[in-house]
Amino acid sequence: MDLNAIALPPAPTRYKVRTCFGLLLTIVLLSALHALGQTVILREDFEGVFPGDWIVGDANSDGDDAYWDDVDLRSFGSPPVRTTWAGYCAGTGYAGTAFDPEYQDDMLGIMAKTIELRGYSSATLTFWHIVPAIETGVDVCYVAIDQTYVYARSTPLTSWTQQTINLTPFVGATHTLSFQFFSDFSVTAEGWYLDDIVVTGVGSLTPPQLTNPAWSQGNFTVSLSTQTGFTYYLEATDTLNPISWTTVQTAPGTGGVLQLTDSTASVWSRAEARDPSAGPAPDGWMRQWPGGIVEQRD
């Protein structure tokens, strides 16, 4: 990863199966809603080897080089010890002393890392930070995804504070996450510290492969492949206008095949799996008369 390629400061998916069995009307809705489970995509607490696979450096060729490194808060800087180690914007190349450090003039300290957001329906970045002192309105703390800034601060933050940033607009692709500290040609201060950087993602819902829809003696059944982290709902209505859904069965996704049953089904039946973050339009359906499937769209 080239520092020059990083942004610089300016000078419910839905799937359904529909089955028809006669003249009277019953519609069954099968929906999948995501549970609270999340995947940790990135975690940096500065307690291990740093920079590791982070790319660090000073992208401003003027002045002395200064850029991110980990520091031991028990013997460095003014922040209270939240955890033993933290990242400091000028941990390499700082001015002053370890107990009274300052960032350098003409600095663009960057720490950057690739994050994989493919396969997720939503993602979140959180981090703890503190800015004991900064040249207000001039020097800036930035967070960027590729060439897009998602956070900026140019005022002091005098206690450790957790920041949360929604990364959902960036899911579906690989990106570069970077933390950047910019200073101009005069006036320096202590600057920016980071700790406990975490990126989490919620997996996207894939087509559940609804199979074997059947009706027998007043029972509608359907088998479906499931994903862990989703809860599947079977709902029914006896009327189309107005539609009033009633939940008849729920089941957590296991990663295997589940069979759900609606004991009230009599004629028309529709099964649907959806991700609540998506819109109302269905992506696929199939229709079956007694004797076999006659129509399917994915």
Image (cartoon, grey):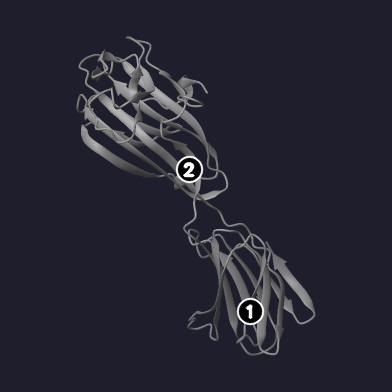
Residues at marks 2 and 1 touching, judged by CB atoms closer than 8 Å: no
Residue 8, located in which quarter of the rendered image? top left
Q: Residues within 10 Å of mark 1 (few under 14, many from 20)?
A: many
Residue 40 vertical position relative to residue 249 in the rendered view, above or below: above
Res 10 seen here: no
Instruction: Please tell me which residue is depicted at 62% across the width and 68% down the height of the picture.
Output: 16
Distance from the alpha carbon under mark 2 to that under mark 1: 38 Å
Position in image of residue 7 (x %, y %): 42, 27
Is residue 71 or residue 232 the one in the foreground? 71
Q: Nearer the viewer, mark 2 or mark 1?
A: 1
- Vertical arrangement, residue 25 with respect to residue 276, above or below: below
The residue that disc 2 covers is 170
The residue type indicated by label 2 comes to Phe
Residue 22 appears left or right of 32: right
Q: Which mark is residue 261?
A: 1
Left or right, 264 with respect to 193, comes to right
State how many labels appear: 2
How far across and down, in percent of the image, does residue 121 sit? 51, 52
Left-right relation of 239 to 107: right
Q: Is residue 166 visible?
A: yes
- Callout 2: SS: helix
Q: Secondary structure at mark 1?
A: strand
Q: Amino acid at mark 1?
A: Thr
Q: Earlier in the sequence, mark 2 or mark 1?
A: 2
**Residue 145 percent coordinates (x, y):** 44, 35
Figure quadrant of the C terminus: bottom right
**Residue, x 46% and y 21% (percent of image)?**
3
